[in-house]
Image: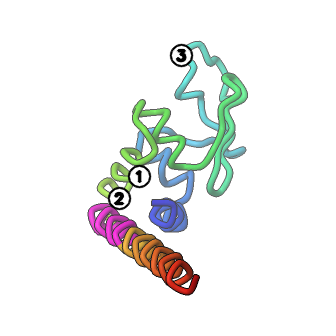
Amino acid sequence: MGRLFEEVKACLSMRQVVEHYGYKPNKANMIHSPFNANDKNPSCKLYDKTFYDFSTGQGGDLIRFVSLLLQVDNWQATQELINAFHLPFSSATYVEHREEIERRLQQQKQAQEKEELSLIHTRRCQR
């Protein structure tokens, strides 16, 4: 999943993401805090791929921003960004790929255990 997160982040900027959700950054790349209803002045600073909200002390990347904004986990926020921006990624592909990796690791572990048992058996027979 980490690779999918990195690929999604590489495709988007913070500005694109906040504008998609209806926020208009000022000239200093600041918006009113989406996380603090009492924010009187823009206090959320936008950087190229990250943000920091001075009114709440929260910050992070654009996936974290969407996660906080929509109150979902990072995986759901990533899926939201893929769908919202029509990115050429399929989260299902990454899940299937992860399952394939886990299956291969399990096979390697079983083969290693079998080899170790064979080695133990060979040592016993040599006594």
User: Where does the C terminus fall, quadrant-wise?
Assistant: bottom right
Q: Which comes sooner in the sequence, label 2 or label 3? A: 3
Q: Kindly check if marks 2 and 1 are in contact, taking CB atoms under 8 A apart as contact.
A: yes
Mark 1 Cα shell of 10 Å, populated few (<14), some (14-19), many (≥20): many
Q: Secondary structure at mark 3?
A: loop
Location of mark 3 (residue): 37
Q: Amino acid at mark 2?
A: Ile
Q: Which comes sooner in the sequence, label 1 or label 3? A: 3
Q: Which numbered disc covers residue 82?
A: 2
Q: Which numbered disc covers residue 18?
A: none
Q: Residue at x 49, y 68 (%)?
A: 7
Location of mark 1 (residue): 78
Question: In this picture, which residue range is highlighted in magenta?
Answer: 89-103
Q: Position of residue 22 (x, y in %)?
A: 42, 39
Q: Kindly check if marks 2 and 3 are in contact, taking CB atoms under 8 A apart as contact.
A: no
Q: Amino acid at mark 1?
A: Thr
Question: Position of 63 compared to 52: left or right?
Answer: left
Badge count? 3
